[in-house]
Image (cartoon, helix red, strand yellow):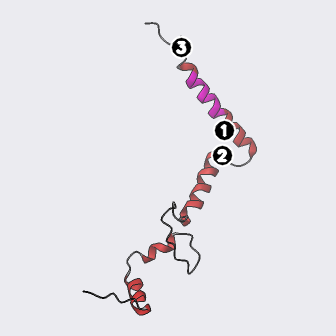
């Protein structure tokens, strides 16, 4: 039988040897928190909030007028697509 060393020194040695430890910095975790929740989507990656903001800004642009105009263009494009596929439209045959 093998015994497992459960001492603090053994745990610190394992932490020091962990090749994945540097990845912890990529996530929004309070200092000292040990995250063990297996029923979750996980903690927020640091890059996610910035990426979401970048996509929203590029998609919507600055100001409410640009947002409204973009919505109108999207709605018009969607309507055109539905009209082109409507029964009775297109070639006879």
- Residue drawn at 56 percent across, 57 percent down: 51
Most common SS among magenta residues: helix
Give the image location of residue 46, x and y in percent.
55, 66
Q: Which mark is residue 4?
A: none
Whichever of callouts 1 and 3 sits on the residue coming sooner in the sequence is 1
Query: Which range of residues does the magenta coloring cover?
Result: 73-82
Q: What distance separates the C-alpha of mark 1 from that of mark 3?
A: 28 Å
Q: On the rendered image, what quadrant is the N terminus found in?
A: bottom left
Whichever of callouts 3 and 2 sits on the residue coming sooner in the sequence is 2
Q: Is residue 31 magenta?
A: no
Q: Which mark is residue 70?
A: 1
Say which of marks 3 and 2 sits in front. 3
Q: What distance separates the C-alpha of mark 2 from that of mark 1?
A: 7 Å
- The answer to whether 65 is drawn above or below residue 53 in the figure is above
Residue 68 figure quarter? top right
Q: Are marks 2 and 1 in contact (CB under 8 Å)?
A: yes
Q: Residue furthest right?
A: 64
Give the image location of residue 57, x and y in percent.
64, 51
Q: Residues within 10 Å of mark 2 (few under 14, many from 20)?
A: some
Q: What distance separates the C-alpha of mark 3 from that of mark 2?
A: 34 Å
The residue lying toward the viewer, choosing from 30 and 46, is 30
Q: Which residue is mark 3?
A: 87
Q: Which residue is mark 2?
A: 60
Disc 3, SS: loop
Q: On the rendered image, what quadrant is the C terminus found in?
A: top left
Give the image location of residue 40, x and y in percent.
52, 61
């Amino acid at each position: 039988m093998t015994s497992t060393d459960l001492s603090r020194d053994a745990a610190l040695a394992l932490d020091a040897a962990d090749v994945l430890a540097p990845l912890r910095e990529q996530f929004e975790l309070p200092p000292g928190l040990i995250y063990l929740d297996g029923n979750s989507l996980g903690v927020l990656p640091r890059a996610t909030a910035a990426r979401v903001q970048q996509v929203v800004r590029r998609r919507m642009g600055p100001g409410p007028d640009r947002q409204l105009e973009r919505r109108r263009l999207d709605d018009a494009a969607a309507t055109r697509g539905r009209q082109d596929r409507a029964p009775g439209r297109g070639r006879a045959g």
